[in-house]
Amino acid sequence: MVLPSFRILEMELDYHPEARGITVRRPQLKLLEDVPFPAWVAGNWETVKNFQAKPDDLLIATYPKAGSTWMQEIVDLISQNGDVVMCKRAPIYRRVPVLEYFMDNTLPTGTGVLAKMESPRMMKTHLPIQLVPKSFWEQDCKTILVARNAKDSLVSYFHFHRTCNLMPEPGTWHKFSQKFMEGKVSFGPWYDHVKGWWEAKDKHRILFLFYEDIKENPRREILKVAEFMEKVVEEDVIEKIVHLSSFKVMKDNPMANYTTLPASIMNQNISRFMRKGQVGDWKNHFTVSQNEDFDEHYERQMVNSSLKFRNVL
Ligand code: PPS
C-alpha cells in the first residue's frame, strides 16, 4: 500500500493561514442561541445547523478537553483494524473532522471536509446537545460521548487557551477559573454541557464514557467502543489499539499531536496539546480556598442531576 503523503502536504498547506494572507487574531466570544462560542464558529453557523447527517455517521461529542482527540484516534484505529500506517494517513483533524471548525472561507471547514468524505464518516463536535444539528437525531446516528471531571477539564482548558490562538485570551488562572464557573467560556458552561448529554443518553444511540474510566482500563473501554461500532476486533488488534492510543504514543505521533498545525494557530512552545494526560492534575493548580469555592458552586450546579463523576481527590 502506498501512503498518500503528497496529499498530507497539501492538507498542511490548507491549514496555513499565512500562506493565504490571513492573520490569526484571538477571537471574542459570540452568543449563538445563548451559548458563547469563539466568533469563528459563528461564521459558519447556518451551514453547521443545516448539516445533513447520514445514518452511518459516527459522532464523537465532548466538552472541550475531555479527551475527544483520544477517542478520535481510538475510533479511527478500530475502523482501520489497528493498521498503524493507515492511521497515519493524515492529521487527526482530517481523519475525523471537527464539525463546527471554521476560521475563514478560504481555509478548510469542518463541514467542507465532511462533504468530501466517503461514508461511513466519523466526526467530532464540542457542541452542547441542544445545538447538535437535528439531522443527527432524524437519522438516528450513533454518538460516543466522553465526559471528564470538571476540575481537570478546567485546567486543561486553561492551558489550551494559552496555546491556541483560536481561543480568546485566557487571562490569569484565577480569572479563567471564574469565567469557567460562570460558563463564560467557549462552548458554554461545562455543567450544562455534561448534564444535557447525560439526560439525552437513553433517548438516542449514545455511548456515554468517562475519561477517568478510559485512563483506568483502556482495554475495557475500547472494547465497549468496538462493540458500539459493531466491529469485531481480534485480541491482538485490541492490544495494538491500546498501545497506539496511549498518551505516550500519541504524544509523539505528529498525526495525533497537532504539531502539523502552524504556530500561528497553536503555539506548542507555550504548552503541548498532548500536555499531561492525567487524572487529578487539578491538584497542582487549585488553592485550598479556590477548591472550597469550586466544590460549593459545583454542588449547586449539579444538585438535581444523577450524573456522578468519580472522586478524583
Ligand atoms: S480539544 O482541544 O478540546 O479537542 O481537546 P481534547 O482532545 O478533547 O482533550 C485534550 C486532553 O486530552 C488529553 N489526551 C489524552 N489523555 C490520555 N491519553 C491519551 N491518549 C490522550 N490524548 C489526549 C490531552 O493531553 C488533554 O489533556 P491535558 O490534561 O491537557 O493533558
Image: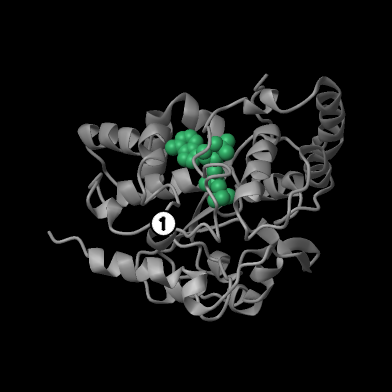
Q: Which residue occupies 62% across, 27% down?
A: 281
Q: Helix, strand or loop at disc 1?
A: loop
Q: Residues within 10 Å of mark 1 (few under 14, many from 20)?
A: many
What is the quadrant of residue 304 in the picture? top right
Q: Is residue 239 above or below residue 269?
A: above
Q: Which residue occupies 46% across, 58% down?
A: 261
Q: Quadrant of the N terminus?
A: bottom left
Q: Quadrant of the C terminus?
A: top right
Amino acid type assigned to the residue bearing label 1 in the image: Thr
Q: Count of labels shown?
A: 1
Residue at label 1?
Answer: 260
Is residue 70 toward the left or the right of residue 35 in the image?
A: left
Q: Nearer the viewer, residue 129 or 55?
A: 129
Is residue 31 toward the left or the right of residue 198 in the image?
A: right
What is the quadrant of residue 249 in the picture? top left
Q: Which residue occupies 69% across, 23% down?
A: 283
Q: Residue furthest left?
A: 1
Q: Nearer the viewer, residue 22 or 90?
A: 22
Residue 222 visible here: yes
Q: Is mark 1 within 8 Å of ligand 1?
A: no
Residue 228, how many percent across, how many down? 41, 46
Residue 207 visible here: no
Q: Is residue 22 above or below residue 279?
A: below
Residue 292, how many percent across, how many down? 85, 24
What is the quadrant of residue 130 in the picture? bottom right
* Colouring: one colour
Q: Which residue occupies 81% across, 64% down?
A: 34
Q: Is residue 32 above or below residue 224?
A: below
Is residue 60 toward the left or the right of residue 307 in the image?
A: left
